[in-house]
Amino acid sequence: MGAFSFEPLTLPDAAERLRAEVRAFLAREMAVIPAVIRAQSWSGSDAAFSRKLGAQGWLGMTWPKKYGGHERSMLERYVMLEEMLAAGAPVGAHWIADRQSGPLLLRFGSEAQRMEHLPAIARGERFFCIGMSEPDSGSDLAAVRSRAEKQPDGSWRVNGRKLWTSGAHVAHCMIALLRTSTESKHGGLTQFLIDMKTPGISVRPIRDLAGHSHFNEVTFDNVRLPATAIIGQEGQGWSQVTAELAFERSGPERFLSCFRLIAEMLRIAGKNPGERATAAFGRLYAHLATLRRMSLSVAGRLSRGEDPALEAAMVKDLGALFEQDIPQLAHDLFGIAPDAHGARDYERVLAELTMASPSFSLRGGTREILRGIIARGLGLR
Amino acid sequence: MDDTRAILENAVNGLLMEEVTQKLLHESEEGAFAGALWAKLEAQGLIAIFDGLENPFLLAGAIIRACGRQALPLPLPETLVVHAVLPDELRNTLGTTPIALAETVAREGSSWVFGRAAFGRQSTNVLGLYDGTLIFARKAELAGKGEAIARDPRDTLRAAAVETATPKHDLTALAAMMRASQMAGAIERVLELTVRYATERVQFGKPIGNFQAIQQQLAILAGESAAATRAADAAWEEADRGGNVRIAAAIAKARAGEAAGKAASIAHQVHGAIGFTAEHVLHHFTRRLWTWRSEWGHESHWHGELGRHVLMLGAEGLWPDIATPA
């Protein structure tokens, strides 16, 4: 009837059976991981943990077996993901490769690219980063200036700078959006698969306000790439990237980033924190339950091969508001200063997530860009 | 299951869109009873749905949301909720007559007083809850007129003789779900009206919907609409599954109530002065949103109940509860 719809979804029995397996695994593995590391969740990187998930068959879950995948359903993958995030598992190392780069290669990559990278991603041994943003290309992604120039022998020479590249310091490969023609803004872009060990690439960590170095500046100085480095078609980078971003906007990571803080807040609150705090937890629960139902609904549509891009943008926008409310609420209720070196887990987790929270409505499309997408879906632009 | 809901929802919306004109709304708000429309609802089989139909709650939720979309000034939502909670032998005696639903019940001497009875003056039948027991009167008399800013009747009824029964379902929860679904429907309509206005109204040489400031506000309104509808529908789904209806109802009423306030505020801001006039249709929906969000437990009330649930679950119990098969 309207421009958008969120139909109910009941998870299949196979997904619920998998949930029990994942919980048993997490019960074994998470006991030794400190609360503040759990708070980082999908920003936290732990290569050994990624390899364990690969051994469990939980990476590349939905991909064909010939590429090292496991041919499980998208809804099984959803359940595995939400359990990981709720537990605060350190899934950051393989996150981009599993969520975004692998599916992109499956869709647009050459057979050789798939065979070379997908099995390694599924084993939890190969990590990717995404080279999209640049100093003058943030929300206006098509303004990318880093150049790839075709050489007489068919190879490419790359010069330029990528910015805010999460995980570039641990990634083995980058999928970069580069300008191959200046004739058309959107039509002159091409995606390349780049080995991060290629000569001429330098990675400089950028310290964020919390003191972490999750993201980086990556400089290309006359970097030579073989002709086979192109992903998909020359000049089709923009439409490929648009498809890729859809993988980024609908998952449970869009409302569970602060779940570990909720857990710590409940520990601080005890059983009887008074009427105001009780009601605040109730409101939080109503929002969380509703967001999960909306997110499941989007997952259901994705699993049926539909393209709910508008609904995904709505979940991400509401999800980021919810996630950002939580450190604010913690402050309002308890008035305990966030302290990265505090004695209590609560202080350290609050410190971590208070400082991380501005990024929730920036990464994967800013709030303003998402609302523009929603407005377009409503027929306003 | 979803198809049945969609077909029925389309049928109800089609009928109500044609019948619930602004003229009918004005007349009803001045005190007229839209009896001819009630007869059409009867003829469409929209009232006796708790009589052997599969997934009756899903259907009830869809019908009630459609009623909210059109601001239907008749007690169809109330009558459906009454049918859902009454034991079969009592419900079977009622046919398809409109039934008033009272938010409070008190004893005064030998008579029963039903307070804030929705559409009380339009029915001699009224149901309420007293100390966990259903109190049903067939011959209630109008003891006082009232109306919230919805300008739908919220009357006081008095009865000497009543029948009592044990509720088949949690009346408070179902009544909260009823208001949640009405709000979800009305918010959907408010969103439609506001988007249409923004594309039609020209200022500074272009439709105001071209301005990013307006677009961003409408995107927020759309998100609130989606959340209210999903939360409200989910509660009726839970009722058909036999799950924890009380919690689902609390989520629905609290989330839809919060959305109602934000939606009304954005809609009026975008509509400007014309939306503030009696002549414009917007207020039929926003006045009802401001009424329905207070009835059968406002947001803080249900937040409190949910909060006690969360505190009982504790840090380790919260996630398993949220992820319980829905």
Image (cartoon, rainbow, N blue to C red):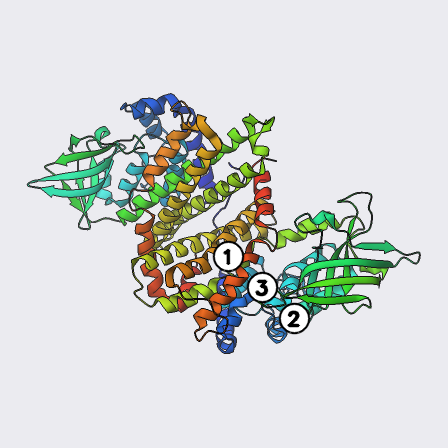
What mark, if any, has residue A255 been given in the picture?
A: 1
Give the residue at x 50% y 43%. Answer: B220
Which chain is disc 2 placed on?
A
Left/right of residue B231 with respect to residue B198 in the rendered view: left
Q: Which quarter of the figure has residue B314? A: bottom left
Q: Residue lying furthest left in this view?
A: B109
Q: Secondary structure at mark 1?
A: loop
Q: Sequence-wise, which precedes: disc 1 or disc 2?
A: 2
Label 3, on which residue?
A209
Three-letter residue code for mark 1: Phe
Work out whether residue A337 or residue A105 is closer to the camera in this orientation and state it.
A337
Q: Which quarter of the figure has residue B279? A: top left
Callout 3 crowding tier (Cα within 10 Å): few <14, some 14–19, many ≥20: few
The answer to whether marks 3 and 2 sit on the same chain is: yes
Q: Position of residue B193 (x, y in %)?
A: 48, 31
Work out whether residue A250 or residue A369 is closer to the camera in this orientation and state it.
A369
Q: Position of residue B306 (x, y in %)?
A: 34, 56
Q: Secondary structure at mark 3?
A: loop
Give the residue at x 58% y 35%. Answer: B211
Label 2, on which residue?
A124
Left/right of residue B167 with respect to residue A9 in the rendered view: left
The answer to whether residue A135 of the structure is visible from this angle is yes
User: Marks 2 and 1: in contact by CB < 8 Å?
Assistant: no
Q: Sequence-wise, which precedes: disc 3 or disc 1?
A: 3
Q: Position of residue B128 (x, y in %)?
A: 21, 42
Three-letter residue code for mark 3: Leu
User: Marks 2 and 3: in contact by CB < 8 Å?
Assistant: no
Q: Which quarter of the figure has residue A220? A: bottom right
Work out whether residue B252 or residue B209 is closer to the camera in this orientation and state it.
B209
